[in-house]
Structures are given as C-alpha cells and as structure tokens.
Amino acid sequence: MLQNIFMRRLSGKLLILTVLFVMAAEVLIFIPSAAMFRQTWLTERAESAGLLTLAIEGVPNYEGGEMLSNRFMLDTNVTMVAQKRNGMSQLVLGTPPPAGRIILADLRHERRLPLFRDSFRDFFGNGKAYIRILSEPTVDGVDALEVLVPQRALKDAMLDYCKRVLLWSLAISLLTGLMIYAALSRIIVGPIRKLASGLAGFRKDPRKRASIEEPITRKDEIGQLEREFRDMKSGVRTALKQQEHMATLGMAMAKINHDLRNVLTSTGLISDRLANNPDDHIKAMGVRLVRAVDRGVKLCEATLAFSQSAEEKPNPRPLAIAALISEVLIDEVGADSMAEAGKVQFVNSVPNGLIINADPDHTYRILHNLFRNTVQALQSSPEKILTIEANINNGKAVFLISDTGPGIPDHVHKTLFKAFTSGINKGGTGLGLTISRELARAQGGNLSLLSTGTEGTIFALSLPLAQDDTQDTEGQH
C-alpha cells in the first residue's frame, strides 16, 4: 500500500529515476575503467617480475632467491618469468605451462586507451588460457621481459573490481538521489503539492477566501504559477459575484417590470387623451409622451431580457438617421440632460439624406446611451461640445461620436463593454455600453472606443446602409 502511494507521487518517481540514471552513467563509465584496470593489473605484474629478476640476479644465495620467487608467484599468480635474448627465451623462475591457448599482451608499446575488445574477452572468457606479457627489461643485454599469468587470475580480479564498482555506484546513486529528492521536494514538489491542495479546496468552495494570503516572492516558474493561480481565483470569484449580481438583477427587474407596466398603462391612457386634444400644442406634447411611455415599456422588457441572457431580435428597415438623432436629442437629452448641463453644445453633422437599414428602437437606445454618458462626462469639462459625424465605409455608415471631456480612465479600458464593471459615473450599473454594443452587433454593425485622452473621447458606431443608399453613396469617403 505504502509502496504504491510512494510510486504514484512525483517525488518517488524522481528518486527512482535518479538512481537509474546514475547507475546507467556508472555502467557507461565502467567499460573504459575496466579496460584501464586490466592494463594496470598486467603492468603491475610485469613491473614486479622485473624487480624480482633484478633481485635474483643480484643475490648469489640460490635458496634465498628460490624463497623470494615462490612468495612472488604466490602473491601475483605469475606462472613463469623469462628473459628474451637474441630471439631465445631464458627461464628465470617458474615452469612453462602445459599446452594451451596463449594470449599476447605487449606492454612495450604504451596505449593511452586500452582496447575494449581485450577487456571483454578476458572478462567473459572461460579463464583457461594464459596471458603472455611482454615488457621492457630491467637487466642489461636483455631484449624483453616475458611474464606468463593465467587468464583465470585476471578474470577473478576484474570480477572483484566490478563488484566493488557496483557497490560504490549504488551507494553514490542512492546518496545523489536522496540529495536531489530533498532539494527538489523543497523547491518544486512541496510548492506543487501546496498548489494542488489549494486547487482542490478552491474547487470545493470557490467563494471561500483564505484569512491571510502570504505574498509571493519567487521569481521562477513556480512563482509565476502561484501568481497565475491567485489571479485565477480572483477572476473566478469576480465572475461568480457578477453571476449572482445578474441573477439578483433579473429577479428585481421581473418585479419592477410587473409593477411598472401597471403604472405605465395608466400613464398611456392619459397620454392618448392628450394626443387627441384639439389644442395642437397639447396634442404634440401628448404624441411625444405616448412615444416616451412606449419606449419606457420596451426598455424595461429589454433590460429584463438582458438579465436573463435572452437576445432581442432586431427588426431592421430603412431609417433616416439624422431625424432619429434629432429625436433622441429633443426627447431625451434635450429634455433633461442638456437642460441640466446648461451649456452643452451639440453639433450634428450627419447628412439629412443618409438612410441606414436598422431597427429604430434599438438604434434609439444606442444613441440615447452614448449621448447620456457623454453629457455626464462633460460636466467636469470647461468646454462642453458633443459632435456626431458620419462616414461611409464598405457598405456601412460609421458614426463618430466625439466630445471634449476629460477622457476615460485607464483602468476602465479593458472592461469598458463588460456588464457591471465599466460604470464610470457614480450610481451607474455599467450596462449601457454593454447593451449598446450588443444591439449594434445584432444589426450587423459594431460599437467601439476609437480613442480617449485629455483632449476628449471618440466612439465609433457602425450600422448597415440601406440598399438604395449604398448604391447612391458608393465611392464616398
């Protein structure tokens, strides 16, 4: 059970992989090191035999020389030592072996890197052959020193060396793995485990906030991951809060719409009587009041539909946009906002003959929201000028609504058209521009912020041209 848990964890896999990688590296290192060990082993026997030959020739006591020779042969596994003069071998000690395979190892020609082939042959051989070592002589007048050792002795020495290297490699790999495991557990595995735990807790209860969140000081990828996770939690909580806000708004609008319809119904009856009054002045006021009441009902229904994520389908038809702009200015802006502003100058540069293909009520709401926001923004500006002009581009009329206001703050740009987040004016809901953009796009156009700054703000509203007007205005700027 514990073994399965350990193997499933990243730290356990890391420890196992570290041990395996170190062992694999040791195996690659062992091949040349074993070849060097073989060459060193043969060189030591040849050097020892050379010193023994020099000692025997310098000691006249044969019994002492024989005792020294026997001890040497027992310690080094040397079978025979001979000196080669004039092509003839002169026996120094030992006896020639019986008939068998002889492998030549000439050490007189030094090699920086020994042959791996000879090492594999001696390591995996049956050990029944003899190795004939030829080395430089230690006595004058001798061509070469010849030493004979059994292959079995060399194979046993290489096996013992292999065992020692294996044990040391295993110890080194375990020690290295534990050190890497401890370091990475602290630097990587621990923080990732903490992030995973935090993610699991956030999934269970996204609205729950930690009492105190420690500041993130790491500058590496883990620190970036922690910061992204914290930003993600903040974004999700904000989205959930907005959803709750919209649900609450939908319920509130449903109640308001029910009661407001009754009030507007009574107001509509009175407006109809005023519209039928013989006095032309009162009749004109009654007609405008009827239109205002109808638009009030439609606005309540549209806001309710938006809070329920329902899209209102437009009913486009040829529309004289200049007249509609004047109507918005007179019925809404001129009646209240422009009067409150006192000195707002409105410049309408839209041609009277410009005909677009749009829904009158939707377009009215778009213009109403833009004009109302602009007039409110101009309250703090010494120069109060609101201008609208039109250009023709690719079969669409592009209206530029500009002002001389202070501009939109930088922190509002990213969420300008996002519901409940872009309310610049105190008491605003942040729905006006969001609804206006959706209404424009539903008619095949768009609403965007063209520029803003201390010199003023420009919004671009594009709406499709009527078919006949497209043909008449083709080629205009």
Image (cartoon, rainbow, N blue to C red):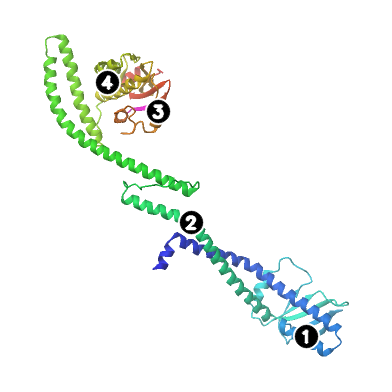
Q: Is residue 40 above or below residue 274?
A: below
Residue at the spot of label 2: 186
Q: Tell me where the magenta segment starts and ends, as one range.
A: 444-449
Residue at screen point 63% across, 68% down? 30
Q: Which mark is residue 318?
A: 4
Q: Nearer the viewer, mark 1 or mark 4?
A: 1
Marked residue nearer the N-terminal end (1 or 4): 1
Identify the element where label 2 is drawn. helix
Q: Nearer the viewer, mark 2 or mark 3?
A: 2
Label 1, label 2: how many angstroms apart (C-alpha)?
Answer: 62 Å
Label 3, label 4: how many angstroms apart (C-alpha)?
Answer: 37 Å
User: Can you say which quadrant of the picture contains the C terminus?
Assistant: top left
Residue 232 lies in the magenta stretch: no
Marked residue nearer the N-terminal end (1 or 2): 1
Q: Which mark is residue 409?
A: 3
Secondary structure predominantly adopted by residues drawn in magenta: strand
